[in-house]
Image (cartoon, coloured by chain):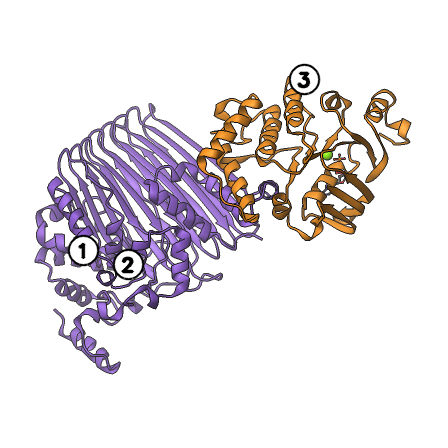
Chain colours: A orange, B purple
Amino acid sequence: MLTIDNLSASVEGNPILKSLSLTVGAGEVHAIMGPNGAGKSTLGKVIAGHEEYDVSSGSIHLSGEDLLELDIEERASKGLFLGFQYPVEIPGVQNHYFLRTVMNAQRKTRGEDELSAGDFLKSLNEEMKALNMDADFKKRAVNVGFSGGEKKRNEILQLSMLKPSLAILDETDSGLDIDALKVVAEGVNRLRSPERSFILITHYQRLLDYIKPDVVHIFADGSIVKSGGPELALQLEEQGYASFGVKA
Amino acid sequence: MSEAIHEQVAKQDYAYGFVTDIDTEIIPPGLSEETVQWISAKKKEPEWMLEFRLKSFEAWKKMSEPNWAELDYPKIDYQAISYYAAPKSLDERPKSLDEVDPELLETYEKLGIPLHERAALAGVAVDAVFDSVSVATTFKDELKKAGVIFMPISEAVHEHPELLKKYLGSVVPRTDNYFSALNGAVFSDGSFVYIPKGTRCPMELSTYFRINALNTGQFERTLIVADEGSYVSYLEGCTAPMRDENQLHAAVVELVAMEDAEIKYSTVQNWYPGDDNGRGGIYNFVTKRGICAGARAKISWTQVETGSAITWKYPSVILKGDDSVGEFYSVAVTSKAQQADTGTKMMHIGKNTKSTIISKGISAQKGRQNYRGLVKVLPKADGARSFTQCDSLLIGQKCNAYTFPYIEVENPSAQVEHEASTSSVEEEQILYCRQRGLKEEDAVNLIVNGFCKDVFRQLPMEFAVEAQALLNVSLEGAVG
Ligand SMILES: Nc1ncnc2c1ncn2[C@@H]1O[C@H](COP(=O)(O)OP(=O)(O)O)[C@@H](O)[C@H]1O
Ligand SMILES: [Mg+2]
């Protein structure tokens, strides 16, 4: 599915990612945990194709496709989804309109037909129901005036509509109360499938109580310092980053 | 009539070896009393109309061009302009769409202009392409049955002199301003609309008609009178880019709404904006004003302005009748090197009058834009209310936008609110949209259209779709 080999990247001349390698198999859920400023969000943005970051060496492949050759929107159409740590507001653009527009844009890039309005609405209503979202979400402008929890839930809604093969969720859990966290976690669990992989970037073990990861990576200073099973997250919780030789 | 000018015209034709043809006649550049007389004679106007023109000309001569707007353009030489050009004859026009510039056709397609209108807009001799005559006849019959008068103002001069004498210049007096005085002297043509008492105009005065209204020339004059309890929605202009050789445009539009009448006036203006340095674009100096003459009358201006190199335009409403309502909804785009100084004036005279102003300005590239608005509440306007929302959106670093709201309140019971904001299209917004699958340009369009939503909502449905497409086309190449 996703293969990152020896990736180094910098922003404005500052090296952030340092010879990072990571392989995520189809259907797997990986958690990436690490202190603030370690470069976790940068990793997400570099995979997504943010042009502000310079990739100096290494490669990223998704299902055999060389991602570094593709623009952001092309990567998205290949099935890559990045849930933003701070979802952006788009005044005047209704949520349902935004979703339909982006879904059709992806379909167009892939050479598929547009969704019919009926099919779109039907699946939107289903997904919103599953996420416990009020119908008025459809009509509200994208993320405008949304609470932190609503914004994150909206990210999960987009995820569930776009049905990517790889979803990277950047701190989707932070700033959520326990109920919102459960809704988000249920959303992700519902979407787990043998064809869909997840990378969960998180600070907290808490999220992993609700979403069982296959692999946990400890991330520090631009690369992965240790990988293992869910027990790593527990060790981190109990003993802190110091137990991995990492300054928090 | 002036012999001298006639002779010159003849000579010019000769000099260029043209076959003299009344349809292609133009007069040589220059503006004098003789020019005004010549135009009036050419149109076989009655004495009173000539007098109107001459008085306007006298007023114009005594005035000087206004310079208070923040607009920067080379001095206009009014003697270098030709003030009369007859429409092109059918022979000179393309015979079919095959003869039309493919680039122009591509733009029509992007704008979603209905197929049957494209030919007409491209200047194809319409009758040769589709059966417009029957369409027009059906519409005309329907309007006639309702008692609605809708015709070129040059015809109305002959057929409805009593109405024109009464209302022409009644809202925008001859001496109002430099450009309106100029228009009064030399106006080419435009529309006259009269809606009788208690009548709801059975159709938007648009679609088919906008094609006919194309050749009204650079000094357009429009007068709409809505009698008591009537309603009309009028659509001016067109999203399609129009070929126009005349650089100076000075139009006048007057609206009169009697008691309980409502006029909804929508404009889409997409004249040539000039190149990236502002060369060659249209200079557009427009005077638009409506009067709510009776109680509970309502006038609503909606405009989408994307064209012209220079725009000077302040559609206004005089709220004379008690409980009357004035509205102004505007989207203005300045890209390339375009400059716009635009806004509105709301004059509250009657009691409990109400005005709403929603202005959305978008600046990109080297565009410059000012919102200039006046809300004035006169001493007798008890309970007047006014709300202004004035938002600017910047795309890129080299453009700018300013807001000049003037508020003059002479009645303590008035409630006047003004809100303004300036924002820019953020990198992060574009990134977000692109990550979801949109191309950069589509992302910008989505964001810009969202910004304009409150105004687009006011446009008639099909027009709104075109206006949205027009915005996208206007901003092509503005990012990246
Ligand atoms: N756009 C940027 N410009 C400058 N520095 C940046 C930018 N993005 C990230 N950085 C820097 O890169 C480092 C890693 O940031 P980030 O990836 O956000 O870390 P994390 O998500 O692990 O907290 C930080 O030192 C941050 O200041
Ligand atoms: Mg982060």
Would you identify the image quadrant in which residue B146 lies?
A: top left
Looking at the picture, how far across and down is residue B237, in whole percent? 31, 51
Residue, disc 2: B120
Q: In which quarter of the image is the N terminus of chain A?
A: top right
To which chain does the residue with label 1 belong? B
SS class, disc 3: helix
Tag 3: amino acid: Ile
Would you identify the image quadrant in which residue B242 lies?
A: bottom left
Q: Nearer the viewer, residue A155 or A126?
A: A126
Residue, disc 1: B133
Q: Quadrant of ligand 1?
A: top right
Vertical order, B88 against A247 (above or below): below
Looking at the picture, how far across and down is residue B421, in whole percent? 50, 37
Q: Residue A178 carries which label?
A: 3
Q: In this view, does A175 lie to the left or right of B469?
A: right
Q: Distance between the residues labelled 2 and 1?
A: 12 Å
Q: How crowded is mark 2: few (under 14 residues within 10 Å), some or many (20 or more)?
A: many
Indicate which disc, 2 or 1, sits on the residue closer to the N terminus.
2
